[in-house]
Image: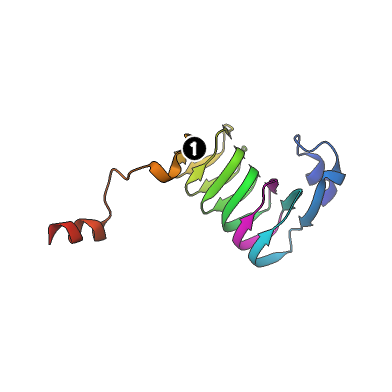
Amino acid sequence: MTADNNIENIKDIKDIKDIKAYLGEDTVFSGTLSFNGVVRIDGKMDGEVNTDDTLIVGEKGILEADINAGTVICRGKIKGTIRASKRIEIHANSEVVGNISAPALLVENGAIFDGNCDMTGNEGKIINLVQNEESESATSV
């Protein structure tokens, strides 16, 4: 399957011209990625993503990153925290490990999601029910 065929499989993107940047399968990127428009990643990325628009992680994409985006569409693998102002989609055969926050969430059958999900918009107001070990030892002294 060619990269163009992978791009055409994304239902939400009406035209290939909507994609502003594409990181192919052989691409390895480390750092902060900030952009406007739609970006698709089929390579490997380590770092941080910041956008008000759409991030697509293709079938071959592997991200170890903290993501702040408008919409995140995952068809590959993401490890890290995802905050989306509009929507997160985790498609079949994809994997997300980490905490997510978004007002709308789609998880297809066959997808793996391992983490916590906040859809309230009150992420900063959530109180941990289980204290971590450092907090427990500080309060028991």
Tell whether 124 sits left or right of 112. left
Report helix, strand or loop for mark 1.
loop
How far from the left and from the top, in percent, is residue 140? 13, 58
Tell whether 77 sits left or right of 3. left
Q: Is residue 79 above or below residue 121?
A: below
Q: Nearer the viewer, residue 101 or 59?
A: 101
Tell whether 126 sits left or right of 67. left
Identify residue for label 1: 121
Residue 63 lies in the magenta stretch:
no
Q: Nearer the viewer, residue 140 or 114?
A: 140
How far from the left and from the top, in percent, is residue 89? 61, 38
Q: Residue at x 80, y 45 (%)?
A: 7
Q: Residue at x 73, y 64 (%)?
A: 27
Q: Is residue 75 above or below residue 79?
A: above
- Please indicate, yes or no, whether residue 29 appears anywhere in the rendered image: yes
- Please indicate, yes or no, whether residue 1 appears anywhere in the rendered image: no
The quadrant of the picture occupied by the C terminus is bottom left
How would you classify the magenta stretch by its main secondary structure?
strand
Q: Is residue 72 above or below residue 106?
A: below
Q: Residue at x 27, y 46 (%)?
A: 130
How far from the left and from the top, in percent, is residue 37? 76, 48
Q: Which residues are magenta?
A: 42-59
How far from the left and from the top, in percent, is residue 105? 56, 34
Image quadrant where residue 34 sits:
bottom right
Q: Is residue 137 above or below residue 51?
A: below
Image quadrant where residue 64 sits:
bottom right
Q: Amino acid at mark 1?
A: Gly
Residue 57 lies in the magenta stretch:
yes
How would you rate the neighbour count of disc 1 (Cα within 10 Å): few for under 14, some for 14-19, many for 20 or more?
few
